Amino acid sequence: MAFEGLSDRLQGTIQKIKGKGKVNEQDVKEMTREVRLALLEADVNFKVVKDFIKKIRERAVGQEVMESLTPGQQVIKIVKEELSELMGGDESRIAVAKKPPTVIMMVGLQGAGKTTTAGKLANLLRKSYNRKPMLAAADVYRPAAIDQLETIGKQLDFPVYSEGTDADPVDIARQAVEEAKEQNHDYLIIDTAGRLHIDGELMGELGRVKEAVNPDEIFLVVDAMTGQDAVNVAESFDEQLDISGVLLTKLDGDTRGGAALSIKAVTGKPIKFVGMGEKLDALEVFHPERMASRILGM
Amino acid sequence: AKYREVDEDFFEELEEVLISADVGVHAVMDLIEELEAEVKRRNIKDTKEVREVISEKLVELYYGDEDEEEVEGLKEVEDGLTVYLFVGVNGVGKTTSIGKLAHQLKQDGKKVMLAAADTFRAGAIEQLDAWGSRVGVDVVKHSAGSDPAAVVYDGIKAAKSRKADVLICDTAGRLQNKVNLMNELSKVKKVITREIPEAPHEVLLTLDATTGQNAMSQAKTFAEATDVTGIVLTKLDGTAKGGIILAIRKELEIPVKLVGLGESVDDLEPFDAHAFVYGLFADMIDEYEEPEEKE
Ligand SMILES: Nc1nc2c(ncn2[C@@H]2O[C@H](COP(=O)(O)OP(=O)(O)OP(=O)(O)O)[C@@H](O)[C@H]2O)c(=O)[nH]1
Ligand SMILES: Nc1nc2c(ncn2[C@@H]2O[C@H](COP(=O)(O)OP(=O)(O)OP(=O)(O)O)[C@@H](O)[C@H]2O)c(=O)[nH]1
Ligand SMILES: [K+]
Ligand SMILES: [Mg+2]
Ligand SMILES: [Mg+2]
C-alpha cells in the first residue's frame, strides 16, 4: 500500500538522530514534515493540517522532544495527544427534550448514510436507552427513499410516518411530530433527502423544516471516505443549520478517515457516533484516541 | 490572491489548490517539481502562459505516454447483447448512474434492460424499479435477499429472449475490504462471462468525486475482483473535484468513461480530460485573469 503509518515514516529521521545522539531543530522540522504527509494522505484538509503542524512544531521544538532519548516516540505522543484533543470533548450523548418527543433531524450530502443511520439510531435509542422512537420519511425526491426507510422500519419494528412523495417535507415533518406525540413516542427521527451544501433551494427547505419542528438535534451525516471537501460541506451545513453533532459512516472500511479531524476542526461540533457496517446494529460511540491512531495509520 | 508572476507563492498556491482537489500530496509534489523545471526551461514569466503548461502536465499525468486523447466511450457489440456491470462502494451513485445511462442508450434507439442484483440494501430493488419506470425500460428482479448471481443469470436469459441490445446490472454497494462481498461480486461477473464469453463488455467502477485518497484503494481492490474497465465519476456538480482519478489512471490505467453531474436523468456526460483538468485549478487562474480581460 502507498500508505505508511506515521511510525514507519519517522524511522528514517530517527535513525539519523541515533547516529548523532542529539536532536536539533532541523530534525524536528523533518519529523513534522512527515507528520504533515501522513495527515494529508489520510485526507485531513490541508488548511487544518497547516494549523495543526504549527502547533506540533511549537511543542516539539520545546524540551519534550529535544531532550528526549526517544524523540520519535515523543513526536508521535505529541501528535496523538493533540489529535485526540482536537477531536475529543463532548461525549456521545443524545439530547432529551423537556417535552417529548425529542426531535432529531438527519442531514447531509447524497449517499452519506442518513437513512440507514436513522434506523441505526432508533435501534440504539431503544436498546441502550429504552426509548420508543418513531421515524419520519421526509425525503420525497430520491426514488424509493420512502420504501427504503419503511423497509428499515419493518426490519426493526418501528413505525414510519410518511405522506408519500407529493407532500412538502416541511408539512411531513410537522405532522410527524404531532403523530409522535399522539402515539406517545419519545423520539422522532426525521430522514431528509441528500443534498449539496451549495444547493440554495434545498438547503432552504432544510431551514424551513428546522423552523417548523425546532429539532433538539441536527445530525450531519458524513461519509468517512470524504476527502478534502469535507470542510466545505461541514462548514456550509453548520452555517446554514447550526448542526448539533456529526455522525461518521462507513468506518468499517479501510479509509484513514481524516475527514473526522477536518470537520471537528472547522465546526467545533462533536462527532457523536460512527457507523461500522450496513447492519442496523452497527453504530458505535466515537472514540477520539482510536480515531487519532487510525488517521496516523497505527 | 492574484499572481502576476510565476514565483514561489504561485507554486505554493497551486500546490494547495491541487491538494484541495484530492489529487493527492505525492502526485502534486511530483507535478510541481516538474512544472518548476519546465517553467524555468521555457523561461515562462506570467501565469497566463503557465496555465497551458499546467494543463499539459495534468493531462499528461492522466494519459501517460499514450497519444490517444480521444474520449473513451463504452464498448458495444454490433450483434447480440452488450452487458454492463456496475460495481462500487456504498452510496456512490451506481443505481442512479444506471438509470441515467439506460435513458441515454434508449434515446440512442437501443433496447435496454436492467437487472436488480442489489438484493441486499433496503429499498434497492424498488429504487432501480423506479428508475426503470422513469426511463421506460424493463427491470429483471427477484425478491429481496435472493442470490445476486441468479438475478444476473435471469437478466441475461430475459434480455436475450426479448432481444435487448443492452443489459445493465446493478449490484449492492460494498466496501472493498469485505472479502466475502468482493468474492460474491467476482462470482456475479463469472456468471455473466459463462453465459456470454466476452461479457461483461464494461465493468464500471462508480466513484464518488467527494471521496478522498481511499478511492485508490477502491479502484485497486475492485479491479482485482472484477477487472474494472472504466470509471463513472459521480457528484461532480458539488464542490469536490475528484482529483484522485489522475493517480488511478496513471497507476492502474483505468480510464474515466462517464461523469455524473446531478440527480436528474440527463445528468450524465462523457469524460473530457481537458475540461476536467482545467476544473482542478480553474478557480486560481480565473481569479488572476479577470482584470486582464476587462479592456
Ligand atoms: N459499510 C457501511 N455501509 C454503510 C454505512 N452506513 C450506510 N451505509 C451504506 O451506504 C449506502 C448509502 O446509505 P443511505 O442510508 O441510503 O444514505 P443516504 O444518506 O440516506 O442517501 P440519500 O438519501 O440518497 O442521500 C447504503 O448502501 C448503506 O447501506 C456504514 O456505516 N458502513
Ligand atoms: N448531486 C449528485 N447526486 C448524485 C449523483 N449521482 C447519484 N447521486 C445521488 O447519490 C445518492 C446515492 O445514489 P445511488 O444511486 O443510490 O448510489 P448507489 O451506489 O447505488 O448506492 P448503494 O446501492 O446504496 O451502494 C442518491 O441520493 C443519488 O440521487 C450525482 O452525479 N450528483
Ligand atoms: K458518499
Ligand atoms: Mg436517504
Ligand atoms: Mg444502489
Image: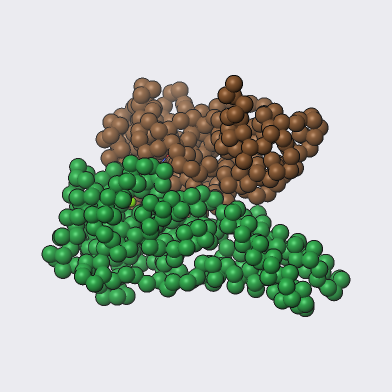
Chain colours: A green, B brown
Residue drawn at the location 26% of the way across and 45% of the way down: A140
- In x, y percent, where is residue A270? 44, 66
Residue drawn at the location 28% of the way across and 71% of the way down: A96
Which quarter of the rendered picture does the N terminus of chain A lie within?
bottom right
Question: Number of numbered discs present?
Answer: 0
Residue drawn at the location 46% of the way across and 26% of the way down: B77
- In x, y percent, where is residue A177? 19, 60
The reply to whether residue A263 is visible in this rendering is yes
Q: In the displayed orientation, state which residue is furthest to the right.
A: A20
- In x, y percent, where is residue A291? 53, 67
Q: In which quarter of the image is residue B158?
A: top left
The image shows residue A288, relative to residue B86, as above or below, that is below
The reply to whether residue B148 is visible in this rendering is no
Q: Depth check: A257 or B14 in front?
A: B14
Q: Depth check: B79 or B44 in front?
A: B44
The image shows residue B89, relative to residue A214, as above or below, that is above
Q: Depth check: A6 or B156 in front?
A: A6
- In x, y percent, where is residue B151? 34, 45
The image shows residue A24, relative to residue A106, as above or below, that is below
Q: In the displayed orientation, state which residue is furthest to the front.
A: B295
Q: In which quarter of the image is residue A97?
A: bottom left
Residue drawn at the location 34% of the way across and 70% of the way down: A94
Which quarter of the rendered picture does the C terminus of chain A lie within?
bottom right
